[in-house]
Image (cartoon, rainbow, N blue to C red):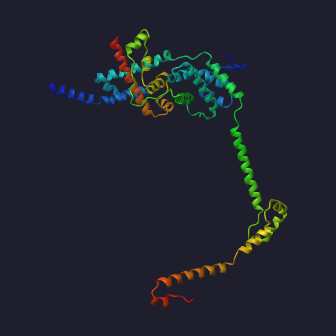
Amino acid sequence: LNQRGSNAEANNQNKSMAFCWYYKKLIARCLDADEAPSEALQNHMRACPDCQAFYESEKHLTESLVAGADLERRTPSPFLQARIIAALTKRDDVPEPRVFRFNWVAAAFVGLLVVGGILVTRHLPIPGTPSTLVDNTTGNAAFFSTAGIPSGQKLLEWSQALDQPLETELNSVVNDAKSAIRLLADNFLPEKHLAVSLPER
Amino acid sequence: VAPLVVPGNALVTIVDQPELSSEQLAEQCKAGCRDSFASLVERYEKRIFHFIHQFARNPHDAEDLTQETFLKVYKGIHRYEPGYAFTTWLFTIAKRVAISHFRSSKSFEELPEDAETDLEDPAAVLEKKDEQVSLWQLARNLKPNQYEALWLRYGEGFSIAEVARIMSTNQIHVKVLLHRARGQLAKSLRRLKKTI
C-alpha cells in the first residue's frame, strides 16, 4: 500500500512537472505585471523545486535591474538644460515662415471669387424667363457692354430663335424612324410579307 | 528657485514645483507658461538624455537629440492629450527623434528579430571594470530592442502597456523581448559565475 501510495504521488508530481512550461509563463507574467504569484502557482512551486528556483532567479534578476538602474544612468553636461532653454528663446526670436497664413489668404481669395461669381450670375437672364427678370438686367447694361457680354434681351431673342416647337422636333424624329424601318424591310423581308408589313409611304 | 542664465541675456527662472504633476505642468505649458516647460526640462532632461544615449553611444549626439526632443515637445505641446501620461508621450517623441536622426545618418541599424548578437565574454567585461560589473553592463550586450525594453521597464519603471506605446509595438512583443532579455542575462550571469 505504501509503495502504491508513493507511486501515485510520483505520478502526480510528474503530471505537475509536465506543466512546468505553463507555470514558468505564469511566473514571467507575474513578474512583468509586478503581481504576487497566485495560489495555484505557489502550490506548484512548493512541489516543484525547478519552478521555485526559476521564480527566485527571475525575481532576483528584476530586483537587481531596478536597483542597479541608478548607477547605470548617465548624466549629461551641466549646461544642457541652459542650452535647451536658450534654443527655445532663439527659436521664438526667429519668425517662422508664414505658410499657414498664406493658406488663409488663398482661401479668402477663393471665397471672394465664389461670392463674386454668384452675385454676377444671379443677374444674368435665363432663356425663357419672364421679361421682368430681363428688365432687371437693364440696370447693368453699362457693365455688360464694357465686359463684352450680350445683354439679357439679346440672349433671350437668340434662345427663342434657336428653340424649335416640340411638334416639329417630334415629326422629324418619327420621319427618321419610318425611313429606317423602310430601309430594313426593303433589304431583309421576303416579298410575300413585304406587301402586308410595309406601311404606306 | 534656481535662476538660469541663458545666452542672449534671457533669464528663465526654473522653479521646480514638486506639488504639480508633469501632466499639470504640461497643461500650464499648453496655456503658454514658459516656466512650466522649464520645470519639465529640469525633471526629465537626464532621463531623456540617458534614453537617447542608448541609441547614440555618443554623449554629444545624445545631448543634441535631447535638445531637439524638448524643442519638439514645446512645439507640439498642443497635441498632448492630458488623458495619457506625460512621460510616455515624452519618451515616444524622444524615440522618434533618435530613430529618425540615426536613420537619416545611416549609422543606426536595427537588428532583425532573430539575429543573435555577439555577446561579449563576461570575463572580459569583468576585467574591464575591475570587478565592478553591474547587470546593466552585461545588458548592454543584448540586442538593442531587448535592452530598450529592459531599460524602459526596469530602469524607467514604465508598465508593459507604456513600454509598448513608446516602442510602437504591442504588449505581447514587449513581454517576449523582456522574457528573452532576462533569459539571456541569466545565461550571461551563469557564465560569469563559472568564470569566477
The number of discs equals 0
A152 is higher (above) or lower (below) than B90: below
A28 is higher (above) or lower (below) than A147: above
Quadrant in the rendering for residue B68: top right
Q: Is residue A36 visible?
A: no
**Closest to the observer, B100 or A177:** A177
Q: Is residue A155 visible?
A: yes
Indicate the position of residue A198 as horizontal and vertical percent values: 52, 88
Quadrant in the rendering for residue A20: top left
B140 is higher (above) or lower (below) than A167: above
Indicate the position of residue A146 as horizontal and vertical percent values: 83, 60
Considering every residue shown, the one lying at the far top of the view is B130
**Closest to the observer, A133 or A50:** A133
Q: Residue at x 25, y 30 (%)?
A: A15
Left or right: residue A35 versus residue B57 is left
Quadrant in the rendering for residue B182: top left
Indicate the position of residue B46 as horizontal and vertical percent values: 56, 20
Left or right: residue B26 versus residue B167 is right
**Closest to the observer, B39 or A120:** A120
Q: Residue at x 42, y 21 (%)?
A: B141
Left or right: residue B180 versus residue A168 is left
Q: Quadrant of the C terminus of chain B?
A: top left
Q: Quadrant of the N terminus of chain B?
A: top right
Indicate the position of residue A127 as horizontal and vertical percent values: 73, 69
Considering every residue shown, the one lying at the far front of the view is A187
Q: Residue at x 47, y 25 (%)?
A: B148
A1 is higher (above) or lower (below) than A72: below
Left or right: residue B16 versus residue B143 is right
